[in-house]
Image (cartoon, rainbow, N blue to C red):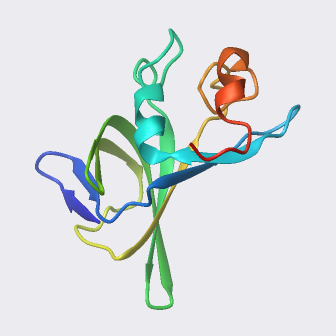
Amino acid sequence: MSFDPATNKLTLKNVSPVTVFFTDRPERIAGNMKTARFIPFWSEGKDSFKSDPPNADISILEGDTLKQTVVELQDPALEGDSLTYTVKVLQGDMPTMGTEVAVFIDIIGRPLTPLSFAGVARRNYRRAVLY
């Protein structure tokens, strides 16, 4: 990954072609979908991530040290195997480079997001199926 503090652009390189998701109670759903299919969900619906950007934990493992930064994610763009976000750092320090990186998006309080239990209209698209 790389981060440009001048533009607040976070670029994840060699990103997995699969995004894993899960929901919380009351209906627990877990599954995966192609990352290219996940990105369009960002701006769908009146309660989308585009209208109310989610927080995320960026976890970077450097040797035996885990560095975590909490950010707000905006404007995802997937180009090949590079996924770019505009980020607002909320907590911690964002390093300019990292190699072992995981991103966990917080959907708590987002009842109509594509990955929430309340997103009934889109539920058939995500039932533990890779497409």
- Give the residue drawn at x 34%, y 77%: 99
Q: Which of 67/33 is in front?
A: 33
Residue 47 lies, in percent from the top left, at 54, 14
**50 sits to left or right of 56:** left
Residue 130 lies, in percent from the top left, at 61, 47
- Asked if 30 appears above or below 51 in the picture, the reply is below
- Give the residue drawn at x 40%, y 23%: 50
Residue 95 lies, in percent from the top left, at 28, 68
Extreme residue in the top direction: 46
**99 sits to left or right of 70:** left
Extreme residue in the right direction: 26
Q: Quadrant of residue 14?
A: bottom left
**54 sits to left or right of 72:** right
- Asked if 113 appears above or below 64 in the picture, the reply is above
Residue 72 lies, in percent from the top left, at 41, 40
Extreme residue in the front direction: 131
- Give the residue drawn at x 29%, y 63%: 13
- Asked if 12 appears above or below 52 in the picture, the reply is below
> Which quadrant of the rendered structure holds the N terminus?
bottom left
> Which quadrant of the rendered structure holds the C terminus?
top right
Extreme residue in the left direction: 6
**73 sits to left or right of 11:** right
- Counting labels gives 0
